[in-house]
């Protein structure tokens, strides 16, 4: 209930319930007082043997639960803090890499060479992901009415409804010219159902995608891209690319957080990456920039 009051997504709430129930079964149905640093550390260590990523998430869930117990006064240290405050969350040493500019160019060439039957939809989906950084489910749940193709086309945007967003907040996200044109061509000419309502992206049978079906569709795109030499395609890499590109063009972390649907600036830092060194070499150094300004 507490997490629901915070506005967490249904998927997050489901995950919290699943992991807390699993820990309770591991404890053998013991009382909440058994939520101790020793027990949690042992449990997380066991989970780490299977997946470091799962162990990290489980640790975060249990620590969040312990913080809530302390806040409510159910289980806490003598100082009133969480009993798990000293439990360390496992680190996962994996650098998140966005798509590269060359990979994006290769994607566009690959999409242009795909079957006429799905080309328009595939281009609209991939270019929208790259241009907006939408999360997978946000893209899946876009409605035709959420898509605003404007004149001039560079002013086009999509509207992410609060109920479809992980942040539970509505927002507008700009569509660039390429993505807006691809969406326009798909909706006007090749979308299976040409009505003005309903989901934007449809199956070949004209039905809205289920979440499982959309993930399978993404897997098919991944296979096509891998055959073209592009590894590890996924919607999240497109989100990384969008955030990194936004940073490279001069957007502030606050603007990126607002348009990307992040509440925490730390998440923006995880998704943005420094400019490639080769790109930095084309820019003036801080000293030369300062001297140049002074000379003007």
Image (spheres, rainbow, N blue to C red):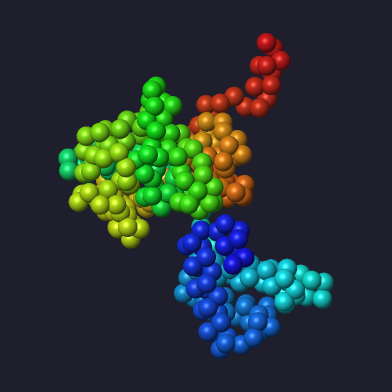
Which residue shows up at 62% across the image and 47% down it?
265
Q: Residue at x 60, y 35 (%)?
A: 252
**Residue lying farthest top?**
296
- Left or right: residue 119 versus residue 168 is left
Q: Residue furthest left?
A: 116
The front one of 293 and 256 is 256
Q: Quick one: 188 or 262, which is closer to the camera? A: 188
Say which quarter of the image contains residue 134.
Answer: top left
Q: Quadrant of the C terminus?
A: top right
User: Residue 166, percent across and down?
Assistant: 50, 53
Where 41 sits versus 160, above or below?
A: below
Q: Residue furthest right?
A: 79
Residue at 24% from the left image edge and 39% from the top image edge: 194
Residue 117 visible, this orientation: yes
Left or right of 194 on screen, residue 84? right
Identify which residue is drawn at 53% across, 84% down: 25
- Residue 239 in view here: no
* Quarter of the figure with the N terminus: bottom right
Give the image quarter of residue 100.
top left
**67 lies left or right of 107:** right
Whether residue 277 sits left or right of residue 109 in the image: it is right
Taking depth in this image into account, of 42 and 129 the one nearest to the observer is 129
Number of numbered markers: 0
- Counting from the top left corner in percent of width and height, residue 121 is at 26, 42
Q: Quadrant of residue 7?
A: bottom right
Q: Residue 3, position in %: x, y?
A: 59, 63
**Nearer to the camera, 110 or 28:** 28
């Amino acid at each position: 209930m507490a997490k629901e009051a915070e506005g967490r997504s249904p998927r997050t709430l489901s995950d919290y319930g699943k992991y807390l129930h699993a820990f309770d079964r591991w404890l053998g149905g013991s009382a909440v007082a058994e939520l101790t640093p020793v027990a949690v550390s042992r449990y997380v260590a066991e989970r780490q043997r299977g997946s470091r990523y799962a162990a990290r998430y489980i640790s975060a869930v249990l620590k969040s639960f312990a913080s809530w117990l302390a806040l409510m006064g159910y289980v806490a240290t003598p100082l009133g803090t969480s009993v798990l405050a000293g439990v360390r969350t496992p680190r996962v040493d994996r650098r998140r890499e966005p798509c590269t500019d060359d990979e994006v160019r290769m994607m566009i060439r690959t999409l242009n060479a795909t079957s006429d039957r799905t080309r328009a939809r595939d281009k609209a989906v991939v270019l929208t992901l790259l241009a907006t950084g939408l999360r997978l489910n946000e893209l899946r749940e876009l409605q035709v009415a959420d898509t605003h193709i404007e004149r001039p086309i560079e002013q086009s945007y999509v509207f992410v409804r609060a109920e479809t967003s992980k942040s539970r907040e509505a927002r507008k996200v700009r569509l660039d010219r390429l993505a807006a044109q691809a969406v326009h061509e798909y909706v006007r000419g090749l979308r299976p159902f040409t009505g003005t309502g309903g989901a934007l992206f449809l199956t070949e049978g004209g039905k809205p995608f289920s979440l499982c079906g959309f993930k399978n569709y993404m897997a098919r795109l991944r296979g096509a891209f891998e055959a073209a030499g592009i590894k590890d395609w996924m919607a999240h890499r497109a989100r990384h690319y969008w955030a990194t590109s936004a940073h490279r063009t001069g957007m502030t972390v606050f603007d990126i957080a607002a348009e990307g649907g992040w509440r925490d600036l730390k998440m923006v830092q995880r998704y943005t990456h420094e400019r490639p060194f080769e790109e930095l070499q084309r820019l003036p150094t801080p000293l030369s920039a300062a001297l140049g300004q002074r000379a003007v």
